[in-house]
Amino acid sequence: MDQARVVEVWAPGAGQAGTGRVGTGYLLADRLVLTSYHVVQNVAPGGRVEVRPLEVPQRTGWLAAARCWPHEPVDLDAAPDHDAALLVIDGPHGAGPSAGAVRFGRITGQDKVPCVGVGFPEAEARPGSRRDTMPVRGHVDALHARKSGMLTVHVDEGVVPRRVAGGSGWAGSSGTAVFCGPLLVGVLATDRPVARDASVLGAVPVTALAGLPGFRDTLTAHGVGLRLEHASPAARHLADYLTAAHRAATEHPYAGVLPGAAPPLAAVYLRQQVRRLHHDAADRDREDHAASTAAGATAADDVLADPPTCVVVAGPGGGKSSLLRTRMAEGATRFLDGSGGAVLPVLVPAAALTADLPLRRALAEAVTANLTHHGLSDSIPPDIFAAAPQPGMRWLVLIDGLDEVTDPAARHRVLTRVARVSGGDDKDLYRFVIATRPLPDGTLDTLGADVPRYDLQPFGDDDLPQVASGWFRAAGLPHPDAAAERFVLALDGSRLTALARVPLMAAMLCQLHAAAPDQPLPAGRGGIYDRFITLLHKRQHTADASGSPSPLLAGVDRYGPAASAQAEITLDQLEDITGHLAAERQQARNTRPALDIVQSHPSTKRPDRVPADDWNAFLSTALRGSGQLIAQAGDLVFLHQTLQEHLAARHLMKDRHTGAQVLRRVFHRPYRYWPSDRGLGIEPRVWGSRYWVPPREDPSYVGFLLDAAHHSGLTAGPRYLSRLARSGVEGCDFIVELAGLGTALPDETLHSTANRLYRLAQNTFREGDDRVSAAWSLAELGDPRAADLLYGLAHDTTLEGDDRVEAAGLLAEFGDPRAADPLYTLAHDTTLSWGYRVDAAESLVELGDPRAADLLYALAQDTTLDRRYRVQAAESLLELGDPRAADTVSLLQ
């Protein structure tokens, strides 16, 4: 509140028996005064009103004014929340200029909000028709008299004037501007007789005035803008958080190689689908579709609209972060524009929840650290997350990158925290969505069996033209749709279509093509990353055509030529420095701050004359300027986990000796064959013979190591892969996963792996589920023999029924019509476990078989089935749009 804007109002003839009336006002502009309507209500049209600004000592006399709003009389008995008026002061200068603009606020939520105002009440009347000031100090109670449409002000500090016969001691304070902090929230209008003293007052909220005809226009005519800000500290912090979070979430998460800024995420984002997984399917070794239920894919947005606590699983670059960012942006938008929703998202990295802190504090510290660079004006207090954002609303905590918490104990702490909160006293306050790569077996069991897990689906072939045209349109390419068609043909010609279905790879390939449409696309994932980083480096460090010094040196060159020379060395070696940082983070598991790690590199030695803070600022700016790192939670992190993996692998493989040691350390995991291992498919089965199990490291990182090793001329990679292919199912599956990631594998390795899988699928001495899994792995290699294998397994009556359902369902994934008949037969097989019968019927839906609807209806009506499977069948029927579904679902609920 600016005391210089407070004015005394005198309305001659407006009081009882023709006497004058005293009131208070507040200058919104040099000629515009806000006051109460009832102060000037009885002034005749065109009648004189006088105002006098508060001054000590008083220098300015009374200034003539007239009411300029409202234009029509107001019935205050019917509309007490319309008790406000605007006065315009005569003359060109009014009361003189005031510093700054008035800010307006609104009271939301349930908190008490401190307030203050200054008026000229009867209690401070002086001889000679003079009045002195009295403050209104207290709080606005958002829960008091909500139905009245007025703000209730409790005066709980300072003096409360005595009531007087026939009136209030506050008389004359009508029109006092009520401020909460820097925001004008209301106009004092009445002394409410609900307390023994006069400590409860009523004020007209600015929010009510904002909707009245002519009010906003009158303000605008006098140069006053009306934008309502949150006045309660909690609401203000929440709005501040959501504004910054929305800004961060709508930015594209990864820097691009195209000229100009990266496009907004929404401009190039294509919504993906999810499939519900069996619980063991989120484990690293069971990632494929064989572990999915046969239920159809569902829009990921629909699943995350108001989900229970759940897990979203996808491989490297599978779109997890973009999905969570999009959900965050949509949730923030709905809340800020008042359209609400059942949940309000808060996006945090999983690493933020590893510390031994209360959840509310961990969330507050994480969002404060992550959003500081996105316009967050103040630290978020933990209490924001201690209560519902609005009555009936929950927090939806979006946890990104659980797989990036590499310490198993820390990862377990995150999962344990989620499980305890989800099942504890705060279960109705929080929901969680955890995004992760596939994790080792049993990792997610901590969450419990009732937490659903979803597989985030890659793009379909039909999605790629839309994805590409979005990127090409953002890049400014002429005729983006036609360019997208040519791009998709180029993908087919380069055998990159499968790789381009991965969202991150699609984004990189689109940008590479847009940057050089006439160049052929690189082969394999490693080649794509190499070219992408080369172009990124070129974009970030293109020399200025004028030859002027790098702006990065501006903070260092004042310390002399030696300091500038050392800084130039650092910039020249920046590629090696970022590689060193990536290798330390990825291979050595070094968790120290990035600046501490890079200063162990010889090219970052601090010059003697440069203070540590200035040198750290230079290094931080240089690293972020590389386009490969961003600020997050007070540290620098790589844009994407795969970027860190690629840079680490390339750095380690530059030295052939170091590279050979790293490969041996990763791949050399020998075991001895014993009879208990007979299910592993190891050949030959000689007791005590040696075989090798797959690396412990994430397959994505191993793939980058192999690509970098091949690029450096190291020949050990194919030998290690050949050993894995001879080591049974685990080794073959690991190779299949490498191939799916886009790793450049030798043809000999692929052929030997395919032949081994074919023999394993045909081996009748093996368990049925192992044979089906081998056939599907063969399909993932693109081997045409896989479909016939799956068809044979679906008809093999020596197998368990669930294995046959799985084989037929996977055959349906190919769109092979031969899957229809065995699925139909199996759905009718009453010897099968109930859930597998429903799975078979749902796979028929995927094939578009017209018999599927009747099958699902029959299963939903079958009282011999467990209720949960009947519900599953009914819900699938509902998704088909079958008119019988609604009644069936209602009966089962």
Image: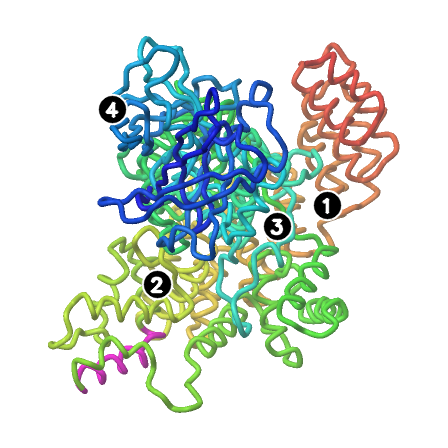
Q: How many marks?
A: 4
**Helix, strand or loop at mark 2:** helix
Q: Is residue 102 above or below residue 738?
A: above
- Residue 204 or 540: which is nearer the viewer? 204
**Residue holding disc 3:** 757
Contact between marks 3 and 4 (CB within 8 A): the answer is no
- Extreme-right residue of the structure: 850
Q: Mark 1 or mark 3, which is nearer the start of the sequence?
A: 3
**Quadrant of the rendered image containing residue 354:** top left
- Classify residue 754 as left or right of residue 17: right
**Residue holding disc 4:** 157
| Type of amino acid under label 1 | Leu
- Residue 205 or 804: which is nearer the viewer? 205
- 10 Å crowding of disc 3: few (<14), some (14-19), many (20+): many
> Residue at the spot x=32%, y=48% of the render?
60
Q: Mark 4 or mark 2, which is nearer the start of the sequence?
A: 4
